[in-house]
Image: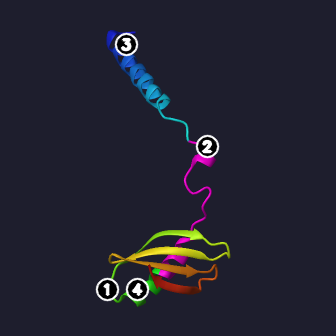
Amino acid sequence: MSREEMKRGGRALLAVVGLLSLGACTPAPPPPEAMARTTLMTAPADLQLLCANAVTSSAGAGVKVLPTGSRLQPDGTFAVDLDAGGKKYSCIVDNNGSVRSVAPV
């Protein structure tokens, strides 16, 4: 083996060892019970968008409406919190997509 081949082989080995050592620094993922959203059920995106549309009609055209949070209610509906240009709203929507109420907070 020539001196040049040994240098190339050494560099390749060094690169592999470096990559393996970086991979060893990656922490293990947390257990499922320690992950976000395991105990609180949030509203699906399509239901949140239905609420955003309902708030848009209440807040006025041209106002940017964004869902900021949601949660499952004991009766099976979802409460969605929204921000409409700095004004806070609450919306209740069921699993069928029927918006039951929209109210400023």
Circle 4 is placed at which residue position? 56
Please tell me which residue lies in front, 4 or 94.
94
Residue that badge 1 annotates: 62
Q: Residue at x 46, y 30 (%)?
A: 25
Distance between the Cα atoms at labels 1 and 2?
Answer: 43 Å
Residue found farthest to the right: 75
Whether the residues at callouts 1 and 4 have beta carbons within 8 Å, the answer is no
**Residue 85 at x, y = what percent?**
32, 78
Residue 93, given in percent of the width and then of the height, sits at 58, 81
* Residue behind mark 2: 31
Q: Amino acid at mark 3?
A: Met
Q: Give SS at disc 3.
A: helix
Disc on res. 6: 3
Is 42 in the magenta?
Answer: yes
- Badge 1 amino acid: Gly
Mark 3, residues whose alpha carbon is within 10 Å: few (<14), some, or many (≥20)? few
User: Neighbour class for label 2 at 10 Å: few (<14), some, many (≥20)?
Assistant: few
Q: CA distance from mark 2 to mark 4?
A: 40 Å
